[in-house]
Image (cartoon, rainbow, N blue to C red):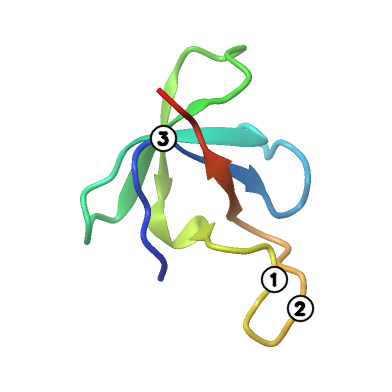
Amino acid sequence: MHRIEARQIYSTCSSGATYHYPEIVIVRAYDPGARTVEVTDESGRDPRTFDIPASYFHATNTTSAGRRRITGYYLTGTRRR
């Protein structure tokens, strides 16, 4: 698993919002080893915070074998202050 840090921006691997979670999220808080990541909707349309399982977060949208991921979130950048 890669390093998850506050202010990182993630997008869904399936390129769209899921039933439960927004398409693009910003990490608010994560404690290494925790099971969930606290995020907010990057668009600002939904003011709620979401707890998403840490296992959903990936460094890239492809697997180590080069196949495209169909679930979860992949890292797209870091928000500046």
Q: Is residue 77 left or right of residue 39?
A: right
The image quadrant of residue 39 is: top left
Q: Looking at the image, which residue is at 53% across and 62% down?
A: 58
Residue 37, image x and y in percent? Answer: 36, 44
Label 1–label 2 contact, CB within 8 A: yes
Residue 78 numbered mark, or none: none
Name the kind of residue labelled 2 in the image. Answer: Arg
Q: How many marks?
A: 3
**SS for dot 1:** loop
- Asked whether 43 or 48 is in front, the reply is 43
Residue 7 numbered mark, or none: 3
Label 1–label 3 contact, CB within 8 A: no
Q: Residues within 10 Å of mark 1 (few under 14, many from 20)?
A: some
Label 3–label 2 contact, CB within 8 A: no
Residue 70, image x and y in percent? Answer: 73, 63
Residue 20 visible in rendering = no
- Residue 6 drawn above or below residue 53: above
**SS for dot 3:** loop
**SS for dot 2:** loop
The image quadrant of residue 46 is: top right
Name the kind of residue labelled 3 in the image. Answer: Arg
Front disc: 1 or 3:
3
- Residue 2 drawn above or below residue 27: below
Q: Is residue 10 left or right of residue 14?
A: left
Q: Which residue is mark 1?
A: 62
